[in-house]
Amino acid sequence: MRRADLHVADLDLLPAGDGWLLCEIGDDVRADAEASAHALLASCAPGVSGVVLVDDDAQRHVWQIRESALGATARPVGQPVNYEGWEDAAVAPANLGRYLRGIKELWDEFELSGAWYGHFGQGCVHTRNNFDLSSVEGLVRYRAYVERAADWCVALGGSLSGEHGDGQSRGELLTRMYSPAMMEAFRRFKSIWDPHGRMNPGKLVDAFPLDTNLRHGPRYRSANLLATGMAFTHDHGSLQHAVERCVGVGKCRSDGAGVMCPSYRVTREEKHSTRGRAKLLGELFQGSTIPTTWRSEEVFDALDLCLSCKGCVSDCPTHVDMATYKSEFLFHYYQGRRRPRSSYALSLLPWSGRLAAFAPRTANALLQGPWTRRAVMGLAGLSMRRRAPRFATRTFRRDWAARSRGDEDAASVVLWPDTFSDLFSPERASAAADVLALAGERVVVPRQWACCGRTLYDAGMLSTARASALRVLDVLSPFLERGLPVVVVEPSCLATFRDEFLQVVGEDPRAARLASLSRNLAEHLDATGWAPAHRAPLGTVSVHPHCHERATGGSRAEVNVLERLGFDVRLLDLGCCGLAGSFGYHPHHDELSREIARDRFLPGLTLAAREGPLVLDGFSCDLQASHLSDLATTTFAELVRRTMDSQHRDGGPRPRG
């Protein structure tokens, strides 16, 4: 079985083996807990290897491996889909070995495959199997297997449902676990509260057969709605297959850590959760409750409040990517239709902004003046409550071209100035260039202009996005051929290189090459082993990762580099900022955008800012913070450059490359 590319980098934290048991050892005294852990390892049977993880971050990463089990096994790469059906039984821990061996024998007998994960300490172990549910013959074998597995579980004194409940898939089998008298008692008790059998019929009592009403049964419908904007390479080229990644776990409905799903956390409506949107898209393809058409208003309404933050990519156990699904749907929904004015104004910003940059003072006067601002924003269909970002009086590209630079053939790294950094915040790109130079790199900035097209995906303008991506690949091709790393300033643009390009340009090998060579500044410094010549305590710094950064790379490199410089790093978990690129600029999204920010983002930033510098690399994150607060922020590149300059002024040696 090929890897599913979920937390692969974290596998190095695990000891050698083909199966792992994670044990948590606690004590009031940390040293005693560590001693108990080492004693447990020492008591293991010969041949069992282990490792004791005391670092909180390492522990978190290992648990993320465990939490990705459903995503890794439900739709294994290059293998048939694994379905639930017998994934929740439990036995007493003392009988767990016998139970697992017996189930494995059934796998061999029925020619099934699967993988175990779950709660060994409680005797509840989950699995999914490659059942054939699409044919009558397959259903016969499925029923036979489940009945045999149920008998084995009951014979060992176990429960058919250890965690997730009985429902229809277990209801018919309860007669094997409970006596006729007990089943009659269940029936009579339920009739007291539901005498007409209207509440959850066919579950537990008088249950429907376990091999009926199957989502992927013989009546499953593969809709004739081809996905032509995105490739969906990991989902057999099918948006339908992609949305079926959702298995209904409902983690998107949580109020805890993580990003997913910011709109649901405010509206509390199921259709605004990742799961709700995936299920609606699934209904679109089945055509039983809503029409099978790309013009579905039900699906459009559900997707409208999706921020395209990609929080589901990092937080969903099966790594649903609703931002991509939304792009594909809108691509078809607007075929032959005019989009709202705000969509054109925001999606085409890189091109209109490039024109405005030739006269930045005039553009700023129009966009910032009290009367002209309202006229321009109103004409563009944008929220009147929002301020437009100010154009820099001199773009980064223009400033770079005016400087004396060395031979491009001698360059060791490419710096990609995205539209936002180039037009609005050139200091971000300048700081990155300076840090790279101080780290011993020979920096080159492509002379030809191109844009990754990040703004186009949110509106589903995928044809234009593809042309933009191909233009970028043309500009970068000479550097890709030489294998030069490409450092990207803006996290959302880096995510576009790593993700969307692979989906919109088909099988162009340059896209995969760019994805492998692209990195942010911290990742580049970390990968090259850069370290300052001397390290001094510098206090606490808080880092808020951009949502797209969380989804496509993580922030481990930022932490590593800042710790090498001497900072005590706090990696914040404040969810989405709510502005999410262009989302908050649409008039009907503005208030929701602010509510999302007020939920966790702004309170968390306010607390973090009291302890030291506050790092926000995402342009939209910083813009939202400036719109709704007076907090002072910086970027990773600016903080590192400032620290390096300060150490140099204080007489310390320059950093070494």
Image (cartoon, rainbow, N blue to C red):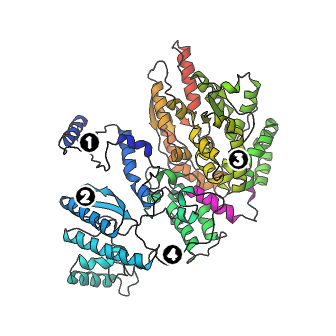
Spatial CA distance of label 4 from label 2 is 36 Å
The nearer-to-camera label among 2 and 3 is 3
Image point (64%, 53%), residue name: 506
Location of mark 2 (residue): 122
Tell whether position 387 is magenta: no
Q: Earlier in the sequence, mark 4 or mark 1?
A: 1
Q: Residue 17: x and y, percent? A: 31, 46
Q: Which amino acid does label 2 sit on?
A: Gln
Q: Give the residues in magenta.
A: 316-341
Image point (37%, 45%), residue name: 62
Determine which quarter of the picture holds residue 291: bottom right
Q: Does the CB distance between marks 4 and 2 fall below 8 Å?
A: no
Image point (72%, 37%), residue name: 423
Q: Does the CB distance between marks 2 and 1 fall below 8 Å?
A: no
Q: Earlier in the sequence, mark 2 or mark 1?
A: 1
Dot 3 crowding, Cα within 10 Å, few <14, some 14–19, many 20+: many
Q: What residue type is labelled 4?
A: Tyr
The nearer-to-camera label among 2 and 1 is 1
Q: Assign a secondary structure to mark 3.
A: helix
Q: Does the CB distance between marks 4 and 3 fall below 8 Å?
A: no
Q: Earlier in the sequence, mark 3 or mark 1?
A: 1
Q: Assign a secondary structure to mark 1.
A: loop
Location of mark 1 (residue): 49
Task: State the mark number for residue 220.
Answer: 4
Spatial CA distance of label 2 from label 3 is 53 Å
Q: Nearer the viewer, residue 457 or 593?
A: 457
Q: Residue 400: x and y, percent? A: 72, 28
